[in-house]
Image (cartoon, rainbow, N blue to C red):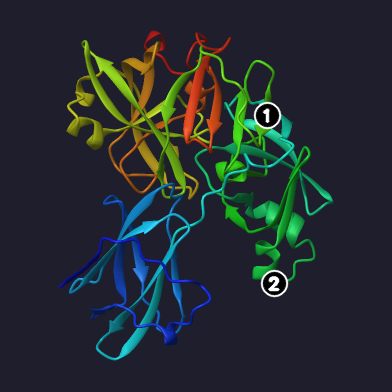
């Protein structure tokens, strides 16, 4: 059985579940799946004790297709930005699981007058991270790095103990869920802190792109600064323009790779937390026709993700990576053949490529702008010449 809602339903938050006639689907198990836009799969646990049990979608600038699969039944909704949809999953024929799909509202600071801009100095580290100075809870100076592939604020477990639990008392949810950060003249209040096992060697934590959601961010490697605008500045014609695709808590662009005069376009997640140049999703790119296994091998290696899990990698020489009229040649690309670190099929653009461009992240018009800077032709840490 499949229930499909092709119209844009919304359930006002002020209306109680008991006052509504809600759609009902059935399940014989608490373990179900939720799929966003056909590709983003989340394992979901039904809980009749939570009313409502809320699943929040990723950033939504238009509509998102959300589907819940129980194994015996399903429900599908096209959900508009800022709206919600309520329904019931009847578990084992007796327990009602009141569930809500919630799409966050679109943020846009451009109407604010007067327009504001804030400058954040950064240090470009040897590992290609953007290190900034922050203040935690108005008292502790903490170095963070900006990770465009992350969402939220993170601290190392040792830093959580040091700053949020210095007396060694049992750590409570309040300790990690209500914290204030300031960077330069910008402030973020009541932020949850997520724990990290490892991070860039320079810093005790990191923060993600959502800190600038609804704004426009210039990353200027010439002046080692980020400029955060409430209104988009004038952008010169030297910049190439790429549409943003939001994938749950990430944002991506699509770029062509050229090998033997043939181009293969794929999704690339912009990840300033990844220090190398490129990570290729082998399965995704081979499905597009790219002969990944035939590319010249530079070296075999392994990396660890934020959960300290080992990911085996082979580094190959990628002939050309195309950014509109700008072309990077012989780019070292680590080939990931084992996992999908982002939870879906995507390549990664890391700091060693991104530092070669001055970048504008426009989270109002949902576009990335890039133009080469003085680092465009610096050698890569791994290259064919070193093999």
What residue is shown at x 44% (from left), y 54% (from top)? 81
Residue 161 is drawn in which quadrant? bottom right
Q: Position of residue 88 (x, y in %)?
A: 33, 79
Query: Residue placed farthest to the bottom in the image?
Result: 94
Quarter placement of the C terminus: top left
Nearer mark to the viewer, of 1 and 2: 1
* Nearer-the-camera pick, 124 or 226: 226
* Nearer-the-camera pick, 58 or 11: 11
Mark 1 or mark 2, earlier in chain: 2
Q: Which mark is residue 170?
A: 2
**Left or right position of 302 against 227:** left
Q: Could you tell me which secondary element the residue under label 2 belongs to?
A: loop
Q: Could you tell me which secondary element the residue under label 1 belongs to?
A: strand
* Nearer-the-camera pick, 23 or 368: 23
Q: CA distance from mark 1 to mark 2?
A: 39 Å
* Nearer-the-camera pick, 163 or 342: 342
The residue at which mark 1 appears reads as 227
Q: Position of residue 115 (x, y in %)?
A: 71, 35
What residue is shown at x 56% (from left), y 12% (from top)? 375
């Amino acid at each position: 059985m499949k229930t499909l809602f092709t119209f844009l339903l919304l359930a006002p938050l002020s209306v109680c579940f008991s006052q509504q006639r809600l759609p009902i689907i059935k399940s014989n198990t608490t373990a179900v799946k939720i799929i966003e836009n056909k590709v983003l799969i989340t394992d979901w646990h039904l809980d009749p004790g939570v009313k409502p049990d809320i699943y929040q979608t990723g950033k939504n600038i238009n509509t998102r297709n959300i589907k819940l699969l129980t194994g015996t039944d399903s429900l599908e909704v096209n959900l508009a930005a800022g709206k919600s949809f309520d329904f019931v999953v009847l578990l084992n024929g007796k327990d009602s699981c009141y569930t809500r799909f919630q799409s966050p509202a679109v943020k846009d600071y451009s109407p604010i007058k007067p327009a504001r801009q804030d400058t954040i100095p950064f240090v470009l580290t040897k590992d290609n991270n953007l290190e900034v100075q922050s203040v935690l809870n108005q008292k502790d100076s903490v170095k963070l790095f900006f990770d465009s592939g992350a969402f939220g604020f993170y601290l190392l477990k040792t830093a959580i103990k040091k700053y949020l639990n210095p007396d060694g008392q049992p750590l409570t949810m309040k300790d990690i869920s209500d914290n204030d950060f300031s960077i330069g003249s910008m402030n973020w209040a009541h932020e949850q802190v997520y724990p990290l096992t490892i991070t860039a060697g320079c810093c005790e934590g990191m923060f993600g792109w959502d800190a600038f959601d609804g704004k426009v961010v210039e990353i200027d490697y010439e002046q080692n600064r980020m400029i955060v605008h409430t209104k988009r500045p004038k952008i010169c014609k030297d910049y190439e323009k790429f549409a943003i695709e939001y994938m749950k808590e990430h944002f991506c662009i699509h770029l062509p790779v050229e090998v033997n005069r043939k181009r293969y376009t794929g999704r690339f997640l912009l990840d300033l937390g990844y220090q190398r140049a490129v990570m290729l999703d082998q399965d995704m790119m081979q499905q597009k026709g790219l002969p990944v296994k035939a590319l010249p091998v530079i070296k075999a290696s392994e990396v660890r993700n934020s959960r300290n899990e080992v990911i085996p990698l082979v580094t190959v020489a990628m002939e050309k990576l195309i950014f509109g009229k700008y072309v990077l040649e012989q780019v070292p690309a680590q080939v990931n053949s084992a996992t999908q670190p982002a939870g879906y099929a995507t390549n990664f653009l890391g700091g060693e490529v991104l530092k070669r461009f001055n970048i504008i992240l426009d989270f109002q018009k949902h576009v990335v702008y890039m133009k080469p800077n003085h680092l465009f032709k610096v050698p890569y840490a791994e290259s064919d010449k070193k093999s």
